[in-house]
Amino acid sequence: MPDRTTLTETETAFVQRQRVARLATADADGNPHVIPVCYAFDGTRFYTPLDVKPKNVAVSKLRRVRNITVRPQVALVIDQYDDDWSRLGYVLVHGHANLLPPEDEVHSQALVLLRERYVQYRTMALEEYPVIAITPARIVSWGPALAG
């Protein structure tokens, strides 16, 4: 069976209900790095901003940015945990990430989606920073929360 690259309607609804995902990247040697991220989904690609929260390094020096530059294969997991295990579920996206520069037309479209989802982004100068775009190469999902 070929890899699925698009989400089902159920998976899309699940993804839109969740508020946080975990982004996994790896450096040139394959060392993993996983962080929580905010995201938006346009039905085709996922977007996560490089925002203006205090950072210890310049945006270009962030580990996830350096990793994507040398190894664009990433994983994004969007999950739901509940002590009632009949409500568990996740969508795992294996994909290709790229950095959209501020002048990219899709960059501004991604910011619209991100600002619709997260009120905090409405006052941040996200136009100054790249946005990570993730194009799915393989979709896997599991759990009772995704049962139709």
Image (cartoon, rainbow, N blue to C red):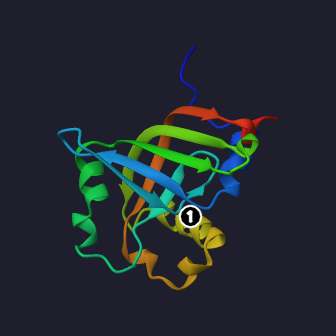
Q: How many marks on residues? A: 1
Q: Give the answer, above or below, for where 108 lies relative to 28.
A: below
Q: Which residue sits furthest bottom?
A: 123
3 sits to left or right of 100: right
Of residue 20 and residue 119, the one placed in the foreground of this image is: 20
The residue lying at 37 percent from left, 77 percent from top is 128
Task: Report x, y in % for residue 125.
Answer: 44, 82
Residue type highlighted by circle 1:
Gln
Q: Which residue sits furthest front?
A: 83
Q: Which residue is mark 1?
A: 109
66 sits to left or right of 37: left
| Secondary structure beneath label 1 | helix
Of residue 3 and residue 104, the one placed in the foreground of this image is: 3
The residue lying at 59 percent from left, 45 percent from top is 44
Image quarter of the C terminus: top right
Q: Which residue sits furthest top?
A: 1
Displayed quadrant of residue 66: bottom left
Task: Report x, y in % for residue 130.
Answer: 37, 65
Task: Report x, y in % for residue 36.
Answer: 46, 59
